[in-house]
């Protein structure tokens, strides 16, 4: 679950701000703490983490370029 559309109230004397969420959104599943599972899994190695590589983004770029090249023929 997560919240959105907050109302921000500033206290007149202290100038402290309070944030009150208006909407609470929940993902449908048996485990609400788990986000959406990807359709295509990408395996990271220890070296990938050390190198700070984003294999998910690299895979997306590869799929987009593949789609573009297949559709241009």
Image (cartoon, rainbow, N blue to C red):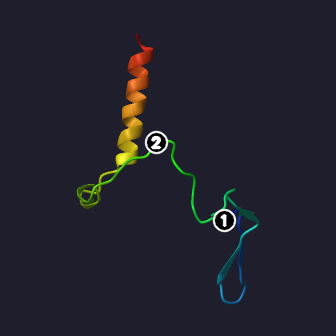
Residue ID for mark 1: 1
Q: Position of residue 1 (x, y in %)?
A: 66, 65
Number of dots carrying numbers: 2
* Quarter where residue 59 is shown: top left
Q: Which mark is residue 73?
A: none
Residue 54, percent from left and from top: 35, 50
Q: Residue at x 51, y 42 (%)?
A: 39
Which residue lies most toward the top here? Answer: 73
The residue at 32%/53% (across/down) is 44
> Viewed as shown, does residue 10 lie left or right of 68?
right
Q: Quadrant of residue 10?
A: bottom right
Q: Say left or right for 65 vs 24.
A: left
Q: Position of residue 26 (x, y in %)?
A: 70, 61
Q: Nearer the viewer, residue 68 or 35?
A: 35
Q: Earlier along the polypeptide chain: callout 2 or callout 1?
A: 1
**Residue depth check, mark 2 versus mark 1: number of the one nearer the observer:** 2
In the image, residue 16 above or below residue 50: below
Which corner quadrant of the image does residue 35 belong to?
bottom right
Question: Furthest residue to the front?
Answer: 30
- Please identify the residue farthest to the bottom as the structure is shown: 13
* Residue 56 appears left or right of 51: right
Q: Nearer the viewer, residue 14 or 34?
A: 34
Query: What residue appears at the point 38 percent right and 19 percent down from the top-left corner?
Result: 69
The residue wearing badge 2 is 40
Please name the residue shown 23% across and 57% down the image: 47
Where's the C terminus, which quadrant? top left
Question: Is disc 1 placed on a helix, strand or loop?
Answer: loop
Contact between marks 2 and 1 (CB within 8 A): the answer is no
Judged from the image, the secondary structure of the residue bearing numbered disc 2 is: loop
């Amino acid at each position: 679950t997560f919240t959105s559309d907050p109302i921000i109230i500033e206290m007149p004397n202290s100038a402290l701000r309070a944030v009150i969420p208006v909407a609470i959104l929940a993902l449908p599943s048996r485990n609400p703490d788990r986000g959406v599972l990807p359709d295509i899994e990408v395996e990271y190695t220890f070296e990938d983490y050390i190198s700070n590589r984003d294999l998910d983004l690299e895979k997306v770029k590869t799929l987009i370029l593949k789609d573009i090249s297949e559709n241009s023929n």
